[in-house]
Image (cartoon, rainbow, N blue to C red):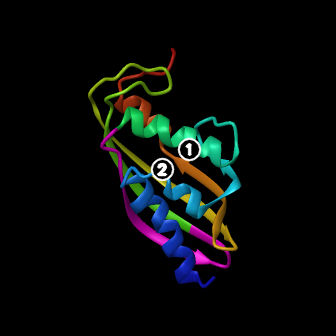
Amino acid sequence: MSLEENKALVRKLYIESINGKDKAILDQIMSADVQSDTAFPDPGGLAGYKQVFDEVIGAFPDYEIRIEEEIAEGDQVVTRYTARGTHEGDFLGMAPTGRRIELKGIDINRVSEGKIVEHSSEASVGVLLLELGFAPPS
């Protein structure tokens, strides 16, 4: 696939699947054994990624990602983004707060044979927890 095709595939993850709340798209764009490295624990593979998807969308039903920048080189696509949402459901065992959050992050997705095979995310999860009102233990 070309660099532009790789970028378009990764944009489907954010725009069509996450922003569109369409988990079925993940089957089209991710390999069944996708390797995921994020701040959120999951059991691995596509099933694990779907579990995280459900957790995030369940907790933040209006969760939406705005792509700030995309860079593609070789088989990798780097995406810098801002995500926003309202905490309306349980999240990592935390009761809903009704607070709005803003999360900034950078993801690296590796594409092979038309599928995302690796997904790595660095996001400001500490800031997210502070926005929700959960202070670190003293």
Q: Determine the residue located farthest toward the bottom in the rendered image.
A: 2
**What residue is drawn where x is 67% and y is 79%?**
74
**What residue is drawn where x is 33% and y is 39%?**
61
Task: Please name whichever residue, 132 or 110, is drawn nearer the observer in this view of the structure.
Answer: 110
Q: Secondary structure at mark 2?
A: loop
Vertical relation: 7 (above or below) 53: below
Residue 68 lies in the magenta-colored region = yes
- Report the residue marked by disc 1: 50
Residue 58 horizontal/vertical position (percent): 40, 34
Residue 10 horizontal/vertical position (percent): 52, 67
**What residue is drawn where x is 69% and y is 54%?**
32
From which residue to which does the magenta span run?
61-77
1 and 2 marks in contact (CB < 8 Å): yes
Residue 113 horizontal/vertical position (percent): 70, 74
Task: Please name whichever residue, 85 or 133, is drawn nearer the observer in this view of the structure.
Answer: 85
> Which label number is shown at residue 23?
2
Q: Amino acid at mark 1?
A: Lys
